[in-house]
Structure formats: C-alpha cells, structure tokens
Image (cartoon, grey):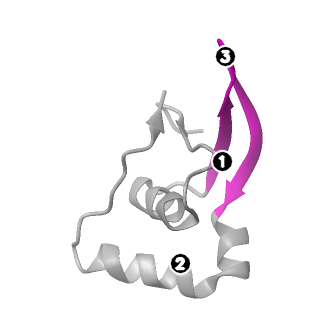
Amino acid sequence: MSEPLIVVSPEERLEKAVGLMMAQKIKKLPVIEAETDSFRIIGMLSLIDVARLHPELVQGIKSLSESSEELDTSFYVT
C-alpha cells in the first residue's frame, strides 16, 4: 500500500480517479465516505476493472499524461 494513503470520495468523477491512479502509479484506489468524525471505506476502484469496462478512458488519460499535460490531482491524501 502506498504512503501517504491516497483515496477518493464516491462523488469524484471516474476520469479524475483514473488520472490520479496513473499519476501516482497505483493500481487500486480506496473510495472513502466521510462520516461525522471518521471515515469509512465503501469500495475499491481498480485500474484493471476500469480498463475492462472503459478501455478508451484509460488510453485517453494515458495519452494525456504522456503528452506532459498536467493532470489535476487535488484528491484526498491522508
């Protein structure tokens, strides 16, 4: 597991989550829901699952990152 722990909220767009995984070179991303005074893991986003369901999305983001354009990685980091 990576440190610091990198997570996303369930409201985050899939494109941004995939961009974050590619930018950080991680294959799985916990989906965290904020509760009153704690956080709860509600799912796990896998780059392999996304690639199976939306291969064009992964290829498009990969092309963007290779063209040296900046990706928005303003996600939760705890």
Span colored in magenta: 28-46
Left or right, 52 with reference to 15: right
Left or right, 65 with reference to 17: left
Whether the magenta-drawn stretch holds residue 60 is answered as: no
Residue on which disc 3 sits: 38
The x, y position of residue 39, in whole percent, is 67, 24
Label 2 neighbour load within 10 Å: few <14, some 14-19, many 20+: many
Left or right, 62 with reference to 50: left
The x, y position of residue 15, in whole percent, is 51, 68
Which mark identifies residue 10? 1
Dominant secondary structure of the magenta stretch? strand
**Vertical relation: 16 (above or below) 68:** above
Where does the N terminus fall, quadrant-wise? top right
Which residue: 60% across, 43% down?
9
Residue on which disc 2 sits: 58
Which residue: 39% across, 59% down?
23
CA gap between label 2 and label 3 equals 32 Å
